[in-house]
Structures are given as structure tokens and as C-alpha cells.
Image: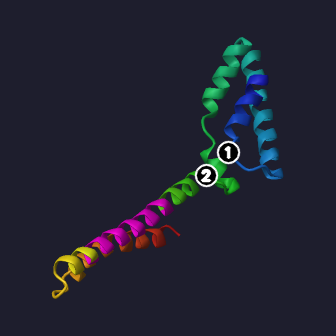
Amino acid sequence: MRKIKDHVKELFNDIPASEQKELMMQDIIQNLEEKVSDLMFSGKDEEDAINKTIVEFGDIEDIKKELGTNPLPLRNQKRFSLHLGFSLWGSGLITALFVFINLYYSPDVIWFVYPVFAVAWWPLAMFYKWLGMK
């Protein structure tokens, strides 16, 4: 039955430690061990019963939602904040380039404002997407 305990510990590996997590793990392990015992009683050997129980158990996404921990959105939020920062830096550098080109080659005509409006949409769109994720 060590295989069952290892499998359940692996499933709960990314959930932060808490009393509720430990109780849930113990309950699942107990239920899976009972199912293995029932399958062995009905004629299956131990290895087949353990494998069948693990396969039928499936994943624990619903349990993760119940515990209130879902690591994927946090990971995506960190990745998205990186994109927001990149868009701010990128649009700032592109704006600086347009200002430099405008002032260096044609200081009498101010035309850099027009492409800056186009460049400003990039971080603005990223910001509104970030607000929508909250």
C-alpha cells in the first residue's frame, strides 16, 4: 500500500501544507486502501488492484478547487505581469527612438506624436487585460 500513499502525496505535492490538506490526504488514502482490499477480496492480485484503483481515482482538480488552491492562475499571473512590464519598457524605448529621430532629423516639424499613439496601445491593451484578470 506504499504505492497508494506515494501517489496521493505526489498529487497533493503542489498544495501548501495545512490541517485540511492532511485530513483530506488521510481520507483519500484510507478510501483507496479499502478499494484495493475489496478488489483483492474479489480475486485480483495486489499489484493489479493497486494499479486499477490509482487509474480509477483520476486527478484531484476538484479537490484543489475545494481547498481553494489553484497554482496555475498564479503562475499565469506572474507570467502576464512580465508581459506587462515588457510592453511598458518596449513602448518607452520605441517612443524615445521616435523622439530622437524627430528631433535629430526634423526639429522644426513635430511628427513623433503620431507613431507614439500607435505604440501606446500595446501597454494600454496589456493593462486592461491585467485589470480583467483581477
- First of labels 1, 2 by sequence position: 1
Q: Is residue 2 visible?
A: yes
Relative to 123, say whether 15 is above or below: above
Residue 46, quarter of picture: top right
Is the residue 126 above or below the residue 9 in the image? below
Magenta part of the protein: which range? 81-99
Given contact means CB atoms under 8 Å apart, are the residues at marks 1 and 2 in contact?
yes
- Type of the residue with mark 1: Asp
Query: Does dot 1 land on a helix, a strand or a loop?
Result: loop
**Element type where label 2 sits in the image:** helix
Nearest the eye: 54 or 80: 80
Look at the picture and state if 45 lies above or below 76: above
Q: Quadrant of residue 58?
A: top right
User: Circle 2 sits on which residue?
Assistant: 71
How packed mark 2 is, by other alpha carbons closer than 10 Å (few <14, some 14-19, many 20 or more), is few
Circle 1 sits on which residue? 14
* Residue 116 in the figure: left or right of residue 2: left
- Percent across and percent down for residue 32 are 74, 31
Q: Please name the residue shown 42% across and 63% down the image.
A: 86
Q: Is residue 11 magenta?
A: no
Compared to residue 33, the image places residue 46 above or below, namely above
Q: Is residue 110 left or right of residue 123?
A: left
Quadrant assignment for the N terminus:
top right
| Amino acid on which disc 2 is placed | Pro
Q: Residue at x 72, y 20 (%)?
A: 39
Residue nearest the viewer, comparing 123 with 13:
123
